[in-house]
Image (tube, helix red, strand yellow):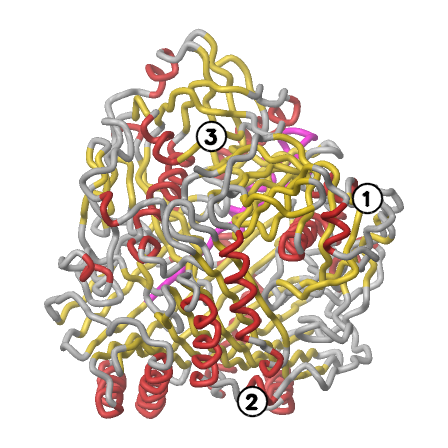
Amino acid sequence: MRGIVEDALEAARLAGASYADARIVDTCHEDISVASGRLESLASNESLGIGVRVIADGCWGFAASRDVTREGAARVAREAVAIARASALAPGPAVLLADVTPVEDSWTGPFEIDPFTVNIEDKLEILLAADEAMRAQSPAIRLTKAEMGFFKVRKWFGSSIGPFIEQQWIESGAGITAYALDGNEVVPRSYPNSHGGAWMQAGWEFVTALDLSGNAPRIAEEAAAILAAPDVEPGECDLIIDGSQVALQVHESIGHPTELDRVLGDEAAFAGTSFLGLGDVGKLKYGSEFVTVTADATLPGSLGSFGYDDEGVPAQRTHLIREGLFEGFMTSRESATVFGTHSNGCMRADGWNRIPLIRMTTVSLEPGTWSLPDLIADTEKGLYVETNNSWSIDDKRLNFQFACEIGWKIENGELAGIVKNPNYTGITPRFWNSCDAVCSEEYWRVWGIPNCGKGEPMQTAHVAHGAAPARFRGVTVGVGR
Amino acid sequence: MTAEETLALAQHAVELTAADEAEALVVDETLALTRFANNHIHQNVAEDDALVSVRAVVGKRVGVASTNRTDEEALKAVCEAAVTAARQSAEDPSFPGLPEAEPVAVASDRYCASTAAFDATARARAVADIIAESSGRDLTAAGTVASSLRTTAVANSKGVGAAMPTSSARATVLAMGEGTAAGSGWASWTGKDSNELDAKGLGAEAADLAARSANPVDLEPGEYRVVLGPEAVGDILQFLAYTGFSAKAYEEGRSFMSRKLGTAIAQENVTILDDALAPHALGLTFDYEGAPKHRVPLVEHGVLIRPVTDSYWAARGGWDNSGHALPAPNSFGPYPLNLEMMPGDATLDELIGDIERGVYVTRFHYVNVEDPMTVLLTGMTRDGTFAIENGRLARPLKNQRFTQSALKALWWTSGVSAERRFVGEETASLVPAIKVEKFAFTGQTV
């Protein structure tokens, strides 16, 4: 592959590019899902291609093709230069890139058992057993879903400043959902997370350790209980959020707003901008003293980890928020020049046919000191919610509304019955400033999110968030109920 | 690849698949997108890719494998992988077999040579025209100008064989002012023929809206009479499709249609259908199983009529196959890709003119479902939200959060515009503006 990358870079140079990088990406994907006792999907996919990104006449151009040959690479590089020259018909300031030290290196993500070597029968056995265990639990459980998926990625990167980097990793994920129906309502209950389950950079061992079948009866029982439960009572209350939902809260209201390309307006027409400005660094009180947030691409096994980003910048761990104070953005080589600094290595592309964008790595709310039982016991009147069901946030990442699958009333420091449709709403900095407790490392875990959408054409990034349950005071719940 | 070449490739893949039944889907595509922000092009991309997806059937066992390589070695490998998957998979007693061949009316006007010639230079010139409308008014423009060319073929071992080329082009514009009281405006265009794009007009539409929406004010949460512009109505239709228009959701009892066919859920002025054969429609006239797409009334004069089907869910529910299969494996079920809401007889001014105190919404942002059975949606308004006072658009409003059942919005729809717009991306909908008597705003941005 090195020769093909080098041919692309040379063709770009000859065509007049002042900078070029080339990525070849080879991705294998397997997806299996069982629904209500029926095999619903069993599919594998392979995709191989090359993408070449160039700067010519001070503008960006990118072209990509499935033709991974020396001739194809050179053709794509010349096309990228022609596209960059067309960009100059509506030019902005000439593109500048922060320095990076070129390296020759390789990186491999951690795994024990390659899931692509495991028999389909073994995978189906786990899914069918979990699916059956949910349906056996309650007649209210009329629909069930059990799914697992795997990615194997190999990537070769080179650029005109000299690096050549090869990286490879495996991602595995699985989850189950029980749906209770009564003709008027459908309520889901998922394990270990909604929207496709839990995901890690890991092998088959991660899926077997989830014990889907062992958790299936509890999930089904809770789904049936939610269906019979009253709606959450509208009003303001103290809200304790479980780790998986804290992860999504971090994702939407801290991760995306701290992507510097959004702040600079690059995403304005699609997902929006950010309420943050360049002048907020070191000044804005984003959250309370209990809110410390890091972006970490070095965490072993996380979906947000790598050796180098798609600009050849090494993986890093940086603080976004320290004890409530906003410290900095996630950046790229281009955007970092705004501050005259180096990139903190957050540029990733969704495959060979997409340009890298600033993407979250593992953006985590650092653990606090509380145990969950102590936190509940410390809450006189409130609500404890688990597992995301719905999410929405405005184009500046300020006004959000999330709904969870299940809630429990808290009365006099004790869980006091299930409520359904527990949604809550808030304004980002007010919400994070209302955080007065975060649970300890014992409750902290990394939640993989394999479906983060951004960019046009749409890109789906695999990112992650470390999170533990946390408490927020005076939150509006039960909206529109 | 030409339509003939993609069909030949699909038929060859079917022949290579040693299974009881086999199906191959081949897509050859060239996509390009020029993206601009801050009044200049900042991203500009193009790609060529392909898909060969093979569905193998062994008894009642089904497996699917796909690749983006089209050489003989890769073809043999993907066909073998599909057969291996089928042999190892679990039996589905309900599987009815692959669909039989039916006549397909392949549309000849879905591919435009002008769109194929809409290259990076032409896209950049369109962007420059769009930007000029904002930069001349101290506004900044962001958006996209894009094109896609596809040739799609489906073949199976029962004689299905259909292929056709399609093209589409799209442009979007967000014009924005600067500062905390800035306004923003939106305009979009989607079509088959890039020659029909009026870049200057699109840029002007967004810039006018941005200028008009500056200095927005607060709105108290509550129920209001609203007029939803076509972009917002398009979102509502997409969420109705996502939650309930599929026969899979219907048969599983999780659709608002389940056990309610023949029931009135909206006023008589609400008729929603899916019609891939309509003159304005984008995309294929056959589905991803090669079955002909049929015009399907979904809601007729307020009454629920039927969901859309594919071969599997048609057999499961005793429906006819309406030709709405997505590519296999499809855990989502059949899906309407060419939605349309029929027009009424009012002008937009007449819809607004009837409201003493209400809200006009240009479009929504980041909508999501809180309850699929009532299609309870939450999301924000964006890029042109105005108070309606005494029958006229008045002060611009801050972006509002709504938490509202889409079904109830249809129930309270008291007016439908005669003019419709084609909104969305490659699954664009042809939709009017509507007047809704009760629509719940539950918060706003700051």
Which residue, as the protein is rendered here, is positioned at the far right?
B262
- The x, y position of residue B375, in whole percent, is 67, 42
Please state if A448 lies on the left or on the right of B216 as rendered: left
Which residue is at the front of the view, B442 or B417?
A: B417
Q: Which residue is at 81% across, 62% downward?
A: B296
- Badge number at residue B266: 1
Q: Which mark is residue A386?
A: 3
Check disc 2 and give the amino acid type: Met
User: Which label sits in the foreground, 2 or 1?
Assistant: 1
Above or below residue A93? Residue A420 is above
Q: Please state which amino acid type lies under the numbered disc 3.
A: Glu
* Front one among A143 and A97: A97
Q: Sequence-wise, which precedes: disc 2 or disc 1?
A: 2
Q: Residue type at mark 1?
A: Ala
Q: Is residue A148 magenta?
A: yes
- The magenta span reads A124-153
Residue B1 bears which disc, if any?
A: 2
Q: Which residue is at the far top?
A: A412
Task: Give the residue displayed 30% in from the left and 26% down from the top.
Answer: A438
